[in-house]
Image (cartoon, rainbow, N blue to C red):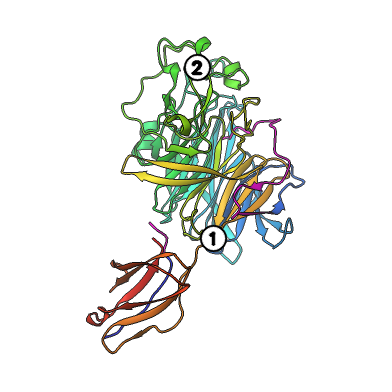
Amino acid sequence: MVSRLIIWLRCAVSTFLLLAGVECATAAPVALKPNLQVRLVMKTTNSSGANSLRIAADPRTGQLYYLKANGDLFRVNLQAGSGTSTSTKVYGVADHGISESAQGLAIGPEGTIYVLGNSTTNNGNSTFARIMKGVPNDPGKRVWSLLAKTEAYPRSKTAFDHVCNGLVVSPDNGYLYINSGSRTDHGEVQSINGLFPNTREVGLTAKILRVPTSGSGLVLSNNLAALREQGYVYAEGTRNSFDLAFAPNGDLFGTENGPDRDMSEELNWLRPGLHYGFPWRIGGTDNPQQFANYNPATDRLLDSRFVAVQGGYYHNDPGFPVRPAELAEPVINLGPDADKYRDPADGKVKDSSATGNIMGTFTAHRSPLGLAFDTEGAMDAPYQHHGFVLSWTAGDAIGNSVAGPFADASQDLLDLELTKLGTTNYQARVSRLVSGFANPIDSEIIGNRIYVIEYSGNQGIWEITFPAAPVPTVLSGAQSQADGSFQFTITGASNQNYEISASSNLFDWFVLTNLVSTNRQFQFIDPDAGGALQRFYRTTIP
């Protein structure tokens, strides 16, 4: 009889509206939980004047990169201490050709870098996106080529030209997912003074697109039927999912920036072929402009401080398109945080978790961004395998004095404890973890640390350190016994639940036991090992 021992810790299974003159935090971010530490990695302001938009890590090495709006891509030289790290520009327009409205950055499992940019054409009346990929070649170098581009499509030339921005690579490295945002605030006609008559959304807008990472020179048509036929449409009815991320179980999620009406902003479980409601249903409630009797003068959710309200984009609209038959709903927020809403009946701001209101998902105008998951289970309880999301817009913590979130400070990092509701949806316990960022716009997780990059202020990169998960290891005594049993000793954390499984082929696993360790070291004996030609073992934290 041959026994082999393997033990490891396994994970359980636009332009974006950048508001000029927004009130930004000036002090350092503050941890709201005693088990978190916050430090400044570095400031990313430089002489180019371009703002920082994205941060991502090479999965092979953990090397951090950040992208600026002019297409400059920097590698972070991470050092200990506050503000002591530096960065080196490694790629720019001369390499990947993206210089105008760089919005997207992703790095695949094998180190390929994807950069997305948007360009205007037709005298500024149309736009198109390009995605360049940089495949690793010699050490530290990449070969850049065009993965895909869109056909030119009509802009609205308003603040609501969200264009293409968010990118994420599938865990199997097969596909790149792309957010193509809406060209309207809430589905109204935006014709550019008749240049594009009766035009609302078009074939390429308000969608999650998907292209194979193996592609080259792909062209995405502005014709919806053609996009569907070619398999490029993954999901529809998304207003502006500025960030996309895969959860530990492989489910894809996207944040959703809401309209200028006081409607909740969404987190969506994105699935192929589904429609997520925009512009008919936003934040789990109906857009009233689709109804024949809509009167904006009596709409208590309109705030005159917002651009779309000032522009008269909310109006009686007899030509509003017919609503699709089935619409997917956003993730439900159970509170206690980021769950304020304005009651359309009386116009008062209320707390969703206190009133029992079903809210999907976040306080209006938060602009959720920077979605990330602890896919490796590197964080200890209570954060292990959780999701995390940033919120861009400064709000009023106690009232409604600014054009932003009401009774909600925002500009923070939220913890998302997600629970799957069968095959229909998720719900989330949402808690504030860190406050006081200056328009945080993106994040990345490396091990038990989250790195947050800011758009405003000094455009800092901040490191938030979470308690690390204990990793069990073999200490000694891994051996077969005379009676045919097999034993080994593991070190871990006291009072931690461990699941021990076995396999004969490293593919098909069965659970031997669940136990709670009473000490940092514990011994396990498999009395049935003698009956197997070979047996592999693993221990996990379920």
Residue 340 placement (x, y as % from top left): 52, 30
Query: What predominant SS class does the magenta segment belong to?
Result: loop
Q: Nearer the viewer, residue 409 or 191?
A: 409
Instruction: Tell me if residue 34 is in the magenta stretch.
Output: yes
> Does residue 135 show up?
yes
| Mark 1 burial class by Cα count in 10 Å: few <14, some 14-19, many 20+ | some
Residue sitting at the far front: 518
Side (left or right) of 154 relative to 484: right
Residue at image location 67% in from the left, 46% down from the top: 29
SS at circle 1 = loop
Side (left or right) of 486 relative to 311: left
Q: Nearer the viewer, residue 195 or 354?
A: 354
Quarter of the view holding residue 502: bottom left
Up-down relation of residue 484 to residue 375 (above or below): below
Residue 221 placement (x, y as % from top left): 43, 35
Image quarter (top left, top right, bottom left or bottom right) of the N terminus: bottom left
Q: Which of 194 and 334 is in front in this view?
A: 334
Image quarter (top left, top right, bottom left or bottom right) of the C terminus: bottom left
Residue 508 placement (x, y as % from top left): 28, 67
Up-down relation of residue 519 to residue 438 (above or below): below
Residue at image location 44% in from the left, 64% down from the top: 496
Q: Mark 2 points at which residue?
A: 346
| Mark 2 burial class by Cα count in 10 Å: few <14, some 14-19, many 20+ | few
Q: Which of 321 and 431 is in front in this view?
A: 431
The numbered mark at residue 447 is: 1
Segment tinted magenta in the rendering: 10-39
